[in-house]
Image (cartoon, grey):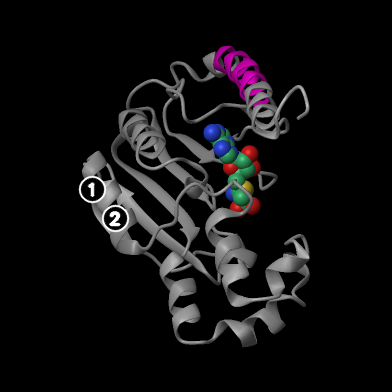
């Protein structure tokens, strides 16, 4: 047996990753002081490389306006944010602890009437497609889609490989949502007026239109 087992090596890699996240997060908390005293802020969480002009784009990645770890408290004053948006991000947080913490923090920083607008992969849709035997045909079609070329090749070989990838994406996806579950989580966090909404071309990404569950909720 090697000196360090594969399991320990993986845990050490994870620890090194978390330590670097912590370092960037601490630096970004200082950076966020520039938003003190401001109101009507717009937060774009887990923005990846999709930046929105006029928004505070937040991600673990280096090019974000703030490289914050949103599993921690948000460094914004209560009631200073008018909208919080995220697309294909919430499923990257563990349920319930990390998601519930973020939703409570979101509620704290939102102004009364402020909006939490979220898009996540639609788990109900993919499960229906699997159960109705639609995935084999879709596998053929999607495997040629240039936006999906980054998926590992084995994903296209059987329907359940695709379902696994949808739910796990390596270890990146931590949870899957349908409307009932997402609405319930938002309600438990204290949001009101929770509803499924249509794709909004002014806010959402065209290549996310299909297969995304978009939901809006409001702070009372
Ligand atoms: C699938 S990408 C989505 C990016 C973009 N919203 C899009 O639709 O293409 C998920 C993003 O969430 C970010 N992310 C994951 N965990 C995070 C955390 N704890 N805090 C901040 N960002 C996080 C990742 O760095 C990644 O850019």
- Looking at the image, which is closer to me, 130 or 194? 130
Residue 117 percent across, percent down from the top left: 41, 51
Residue 141 position by quadrant: bottom right
SS of the residue at dot 1?
A: helix
Residue 187 percent across, percent down from the top left: 23, 48
Q: Is residue 182 part of the magenta span, yes or no?
A: no
- Looking at the image, which is closer to me, 91 or 200? 91
Residue 9 position by quadrant: top right
- Do labels 2 and 1 touch, CB within 8 Å? yes
Residue for point 59% across, 64% down: 208
Disc number for residue 187: 1
Image quarter hosting the N terminus: top right
Examine the rendering and report whether any part of residue 54 can be seen.
no
Residue for point 55% across, 19% down: 32
Residue 77 percent across, percent down from the top left: 39, 20
According to the picture, the residue beneath numbered tag 2 turns out to be 183
**Where does the magenta region start and end?**
17-30
Q: Is residue 20 above or below residue 145?
A: above
Apparent side of residue 126 relative to residue 152 in the rendered image (left or right): left
SS of the residue at dot 2?
A: helix
Q: Quadrant of ligand 1?
A: top right
| Disc 2 from disc 1: Cα separation | 6 Å
Examine the rendering and report whether any part of residue 88 can be seen.
yes
Residue 175 percent across, percent down from the top left: 45, 50
- Looking at the image, which is closer to me, 175 or 216? 175
Image quarter hosting the C terminus: top left
């Amino acid at each position: 047996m090697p000196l360090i087992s594969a399991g320990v090596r993986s845990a050490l890699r994870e620890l090194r990753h978390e330590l670097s996240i912590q370092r960037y997060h601490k630096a970004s908390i200082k950076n966020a002081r520039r938003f003190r005293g401001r109101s009507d802020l717009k937060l774009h969480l887990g923005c990846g490389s999709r930046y929105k002009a006029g928004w505070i784009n937040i991600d673990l990645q280096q090019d974000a306006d703030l490289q914050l770890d949103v599993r921690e408290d948000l460094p914004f004053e209560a009631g200073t944010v008018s909208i919080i948006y995220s697309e294909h991000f919430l499923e990257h947080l563990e349920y319930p602890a990390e998601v519930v913490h973020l939703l409570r923090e979101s509620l704290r920083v939102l102004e009364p009437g402020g909006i939490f607008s979220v898009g996540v992969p639609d788990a109900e849709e993919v499960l229906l497609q699997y159960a109705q035997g639609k995935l084999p045909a879709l596998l053929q079609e999607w495997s040629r889609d240039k936006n999906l070329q980054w998926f590992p090749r084995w994903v296209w070989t059987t329907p359940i490989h695709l379902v696994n990838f949808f739910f796990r994406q390596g270890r990146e996806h931590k949870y899957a949502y349908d409307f009932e579950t997402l609405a319930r989580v938002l309600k438990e966090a204290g949001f009101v007026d929770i509803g499924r909404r249509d794709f909004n071309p002014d806010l959402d990404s065209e290549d996310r239109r299909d297969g995304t569950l978009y939901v809006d909720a409001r702070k009372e």
